């Protein structure tokens, strides 16, 4: 048995505990949670707060070799041009080394679970048997309708490799602007069959303009590259996705749907999606969205609507650092009214729930094995992180 304690424990499912402790069994299972009563013999006490292990609800760990190579504030059209030019700008050995370094760093800084996007098999060996739980989303693209069948066939081959590696995985669509309607429907059907979809949603105004009204820089980018574009819908881009889902089977949908970014999502889109998606998680990637678009999702609006929110880092092609704590600081800086308790609920319990792992991860409750993470340099008056705050895995 190991007892750890800190200035505050955040169980997540209940209020923070001043001078709280957690008892862990030797295998990392939570045995008890409580408040110190003066007896500290055998207790490990840490200055800061102790929280359960994080879930990084959106990452592209395969792109770790792109650190420092991308220009900021290019918008989605400019970002796509860069990813097409730079994605394979390093040899395989260098890509794998960068990926493994970032994966280990994320785990040591407290990430216990991760929703990770894969476009190849380079991360599979690393994930197999890792301490960090991962759900791998085999992401597909293809703007030409006639290519949909062959794209899905290749994705199934990649999925078979993931299954052989012993990792949880499934096929998922990327976004409305990178896929024909046929491929979006087929990839969504594949994802629904596994119970999970991770879908880039309304990341930019360019996306909404292109899908809804055939206008804007992203639309012009596709025209200049002579790529097929889905018919204009006259509606926000999210409706294009939900319409394709309802071609697969009638609403409602009980599968886990992770909608990623949501930078320009508005109340009408959110309400419409929530009306048919029973287990939807709205994932925000603050630093990535600022890197590309200089804006963030309207988190107060999402909170007002009572939806489930989670947090991701995205990749080092659109971020300077993969760090959950730095994402928290970013949220503090833009929305200081959002309590730390709420942010931690998003990144611990909500993220775990999005991956169907909330019975094991996400909170300090007896019987769970969430890990324990210390965040230091806390401003206890405001209960906010400070610029010096860092996270470190304790268990």
Image (tube, helix red, strand yellow):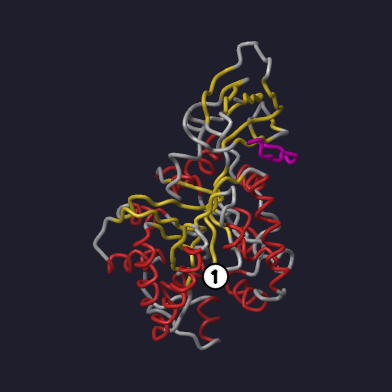
Residue 264 image point, x, y percent:
49, 59
321 up-or-down from 344: above or below: below
Q: Which residue appears farthest toward the bottom when viewing the image?
A: 226
Q: Main secondary structure of the magenta part?
A: loop
45 up-or-down from 73: above or below: above
Q: Is 333 in front, or is 379?
A: 379
Residue 337: say if magenta.
no
Residue 73 visible in the picture: yes
Residue at image x 72%, y 39%?
389
Residue at image x 71%, y 37%?
386
Q: Which residue appears farthest toward the left when viewing the image?
A: 250
Read off the magenta span: 385-395
Mark 1 element type: loop
Write down the residue under mark 1: 119
Q: Is 93 in front, or is 88?
A: 93
Residue 119 location, quadrant: bottom right
178 up-or-down from 200: above or below: below
Residue 317 image point, x, y percent:
66, 65
Residue 156 image point, x, y percent:
43, 72
């Amino acid at each position: 048995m190991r007892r750890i304690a800190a200035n505050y424990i955040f169980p997540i499912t209940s209020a923070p505990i001043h001078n709280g402790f957690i008892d862990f069994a030797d295998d990392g299972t939570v045995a008890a949670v409580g408040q110190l009563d003066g007896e500290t013999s055998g207790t490990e006490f840490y200055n800061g707060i102790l929280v359960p292990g994080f879930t990084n609800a959106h990452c592209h760990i395969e792109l770790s070799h792109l650190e420092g190579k991308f220009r900021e504030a290019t918008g989605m059209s400019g970002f796509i041009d860069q990813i097409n030019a730079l994605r394979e700008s390093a040899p395989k050995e260098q890509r794998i080394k960068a990926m493994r370094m970032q994966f280990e760093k994320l785990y040591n800084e407290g990430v216990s679970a991760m929703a990770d996007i894969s476009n190849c098999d380079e991360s599979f060996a690393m994930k197999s048997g890792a301490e960090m739980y991962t759900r791998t989303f085999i992401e597909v693209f293809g703007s030409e309708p006639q290519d949909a069948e062959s794209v899905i066939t290749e994705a199934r081959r990649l999925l078979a490799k993931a299954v052989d590696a012993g990792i949880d995985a499934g096929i998922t669509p990327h976004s409305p602007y990178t896929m024909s309607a046929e491929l979006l429907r087929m990839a969504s059907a594949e994802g629904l069959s596994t119970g999970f979809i991770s879908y880039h949603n309304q990341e930019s105004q360019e996306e909404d303009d292109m899908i809804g009204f055939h206008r804007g820089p992203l639309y012009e980018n596709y025209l200049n590259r002579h790529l097929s574009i889905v018919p204009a819908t006259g509606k926000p881009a999210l409706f294009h996705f939900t319409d394709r889902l309802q071609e697969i089977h009638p609403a409602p949908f009980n599968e886990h749907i992770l909608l990623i970014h949501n930078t320009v999502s508005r109340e009408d889109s959110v309400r419409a999606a929530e009306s048919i998606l029973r287990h939807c998680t709205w994932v925000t990637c603050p630093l990535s969205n600022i890197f590309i678009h200089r804006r963030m999702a309207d988190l107060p609006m999402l909170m007002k609507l009572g939806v489930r929110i989670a947090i991701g880092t995205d990749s080092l092609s659109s971020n300077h650092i993969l760090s959950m704590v730095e994402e928290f600081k970013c949220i503090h800086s833009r929305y200081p009214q959002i309590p730390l308790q709420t942010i931690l609920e998003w990144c611990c319990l909500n993220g775990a729930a999005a991956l169907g792992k909330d019975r094991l991860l996400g909170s300090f409750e007896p019987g769970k094995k969430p890990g324990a993470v210390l965040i230091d340099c806390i401003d206890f008056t405001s209960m906010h992180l400070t610029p010096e705050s860092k996270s470190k895995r304790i268990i």
